[in-house]
Amino acid sequence: MARYNGNRRSVPTPTKELIVYMLAFLRPKKVARYLGLSTRTVFRVYALWASTGSVMRERLQDGRPRKLNGLDAAYLESCVARTPDIYLDELQDMLFEGRQVLVSIATIERTLCRRGWTRKTVS
């Protein structure tokens, strides 16, 4: 039912929702005993639900937001698909002319790599 994560145990969302429902009828100690959780977990889930209206925390965004969104990346992909031998500085100019987005060549290269495009190799 619950997964272990280091010292902590991950409580599934349906169980957290059950905690909130059961607290309408039972005391926290009984809810904890019936579900096999600590009383502190029951209080924490209820406090989160009371303050946010949800039993799950919103995940924080990891790192900085990307400069190029999905439409910009799709525009770059279409430019590469249309002209496969295009240079990165030409892509930079086309991106600025077509989408009014000014980014570095390294950003364009990383974006294309993330989308599965690689450099051509000389044989």
Image (cartoon, rainbow, N blue to C red):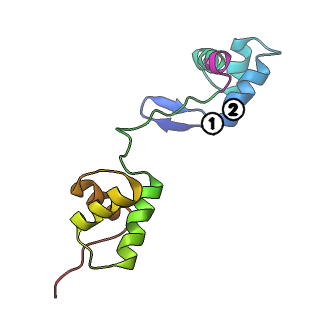
Which numbered tag is attached to residue 12? 1
Which numbered tag is attached to residue 46? none
**In the shown orientation, is residue 36 left or right of residue 84?**
right
Residue closest to the far left: 123
**In the shown orientation, is residue 11 left or right of residue 87?**
right
Kindly tell me whether residue 81 is visible in this rendering: yes
Percent coordinates x, y for residue 50 in the rendering: 67, 15
Percent coordinates x, y for residue 122 in the rendering: 16, 84
Q: Which residues are magenta?
A: 48-54
Percent coordinates x, y for residue 68 in the rendering: 38, 51
Kindly tell me whether residue 34 is visible in this rendering: no
> Which secondary structure class fits the magenta region best?
helix
Q: Which residue does the image show at 34% across and 70% down from the upper left? A: 117
Percent coordinates x, y for residue 31 in the rendering: 72, 19
| Label 1 crowd bin: few (<14), some (14–19), many (20+), radius 10 Å | few
The image shows residue 80, relative to residue 28, as above or below, that is below
Picture quadrant where residue 53 is located: top right
Q: Which residue does the image show at 73% across and 22% down from the upper left? A: 20
Quarter of the image with the N terminus is top right
**In the shown orientation, is residue 78 left or right of residue 109?**
right
Residue 49 is one of the magenta-drawn residues? yes
The image shows residue 60, relative to residue 95, as above or below, that is above
Tell me the residue that label 2 is attached to.
15
| Label 2 crowd bin: few (<14), some (14–19), many (20+), radius 10 Å | some
**In the shown orientation, is residue 52 left or right of residue 21?**
left
Q: Which residue does the image show at 70% across and 36% down from the upper left? A: 14
User: What is the CA distance from the residue labelled 1 to the residue labelled 2?
Assistant: 5 Å
Q: Nearer the viewer, residue 93 or 13?
A: 93
Amino acid under disc 1: Pro
